[in-house]
Image (cartoon, rainbow, N blue to C red):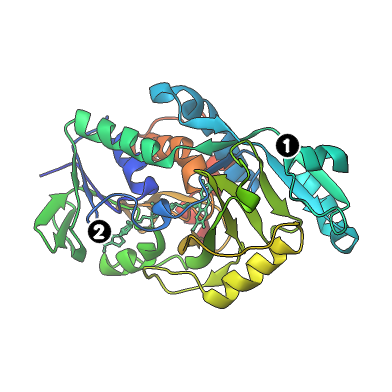
Amino acid sequence: MTDFIIIGGGIAGISAAARLSHLGRVTLLEREGALGYHASGRSAALFEETYGKPSVVALNRASKSYHMTENGGVLSPRGIMLVGSPATAEVFDHDLKTMEMDPVTMAEALRLFPILDPAVVDRAAWHSEAWDIDTDRLIQNFAREVRGNGGQVVTGAEVTGITRTALGWQVLTTLDAYDAPILVNAAGAWVDVVAGMAGIKPLGFTPLRRSMARIPAPGGRDVSAWPMVFGAGEDWYAKPDAGALIVSPAEEDPAEPHDAWADDMVLAEGLARYEAHVTEPVTRLLSSWAGLRTFSPDRQLVLGPDPANPAFVWCAGQGGYGFQTSPAASQLLADIVAGRASDLDAETVAATNPGRFR
Ligand SMILES: Cc1cc2nc3c(=O)[nH]c(=O)nc-3n(C[C@H](O)[C@H](O)[C@H](O)COP(=O)(O)OP(=O)(O)OC[C@H]3O[C@@H](n4cnc5c(N)ncnc54)[C@H](O)[C@@H]3O)c2cc1C
């Protein structure tokens, strides 16, 4: 018997499990053989405070000091740059404002990202307040916290059935059956499937595929200090990654929950958009992949008990912000479960309440 069962071993589930492990015994159930196999193993690993709707931004901001300091910190400086052309002037101005960026001269832009093509790009903006997240370390830090508090992380355990019992829930997996009074649904793209298994009305989440290509460092350059670079309107981005560049078409194509892979045509079109802004052609791919960014209908996180059954707790809708929001989102979830007041403002707490969809 355990106090909390958490379904899902991505960043959402493991961070929730870590926080809840201070309140009781937790058991985390993950279908795959390791933590972070799905969306959490496929991200761009960026921390950027201004990215997302106001409640997401509030969670980002509230997560910053944890990311900076806890367990020695998981952030390292990156910075982001936005680039545009006369054709994208309007979107560029919009992004400049929402992302709180500062315009820079083309000379400065070229110093920061030397492969920009000045024949196409005539405007750029810069923002130093963006960091790489060591996502593996973050996941392992939370996992250590779970185990340190006597909790267990069970991998290779696919949840195949959930039944209501007098005590709470019985969860059937491919390995064993588990009982607990409280069930936390952190199943990423599968959250509505898990809700359905438990007889809870789904909330209407949409997994959106996003593809990624890894290409060799352009012209063999040292890219380690380059910023992350966005096309205006976020229709492509590029980011240094262990000596290479990752480039994403930044698509949002709706998909059923599945083990996602990159769409060749979407990837080619995205790489062409990136190539149109730089002087170095893409000659080959080192690898490619895709992940599902799962959004609630209003693109804000969903954290807390279902109004129809408070023993069923949602930890869902992390969208494109699951890593950066995880410290504050998991803390809020634990505060709600413990009946404690949250340090977050009331608007943010209300904006993430599952009750808003009922
Ligand atoms: C290309 C891309 C770029 C991104 N960039 C960033 C970024 O820069 N910064 C950022 O913060 N976020 C980013 N994200 C978003 C971030 O990756 C996600 O928000 C986060 O990983 C979601 O975590 P999760 O735990 O909800 O989902 P997942 O990592 O998918 O975990 C859910 C888990 O539930 C398990 N599961 C499902 N059903 C069952 C079942 N029946 N039984 C047992 N287990 C089950 C799955 O196997 C899975 O491991 C990006 C995402 C993508 C795809």
Task: Name the one closer to the observer, 203 or 106.
Answer: 106
Left or right of 151: which side holds 317? right
Residue at 47% of width from left, 68% of height from top?
204
Counting residues from the start of the chain, the first of labels 2 and 1 encountered is 2
Q: Is residue 327 left or right of residue 88?
A: left
User: What residue is drawn where x is 24% and y is 54%?
Assistant: 30
Q: Height in image: 13 above or below 281?
A: above
Q: Secondary structure at mark 2?
A: loop
Task: Determine the image quadrant of residue 159.
Answer: bottom left
Seen at 51% across and 33% down, the residue is 63
Quadrant for ligand 1? bottom left
User: How far apart are the alpha carbons under marks 2 and 1?
Assistant: 37 Å
Q: Which mark is residue 127?
A: 1
Q: Position of residue 201 (x, y in %)?
A: 37, 68
Which residue is found at the position 86% from the left and 58% from the top?
A: 85
Q: Where residue 128 sits: x, y (%)?
A: 69, 33
Apparent side of residue 328 relative to residue 15 in the rendered image (left or right): right
Q: Secondary structure at mark 1?
A: strand
Q: Quadrant of residue 130?
A: top right
- Mark 2 surroundings within 10 Å by alpha-carbon count, few (fewer than 14), some (14 through 19), many (20 or more): some
The kind of residue on which mark 2 rests is Glu
Mark 2, residue position: 32
In percent of width and height, residue 229 lies at: 69, 48
* Label 1 Cα neighbours within 10 Å, binned few <14 / some 14-19 / many ≥20: some
Which sits in the foreground, 244 or 44?
Answer: 244
Q: Amino acid at mark 1?
A: His
Q: Is mark 2 within 8 Å of ligand 1?
A: yes
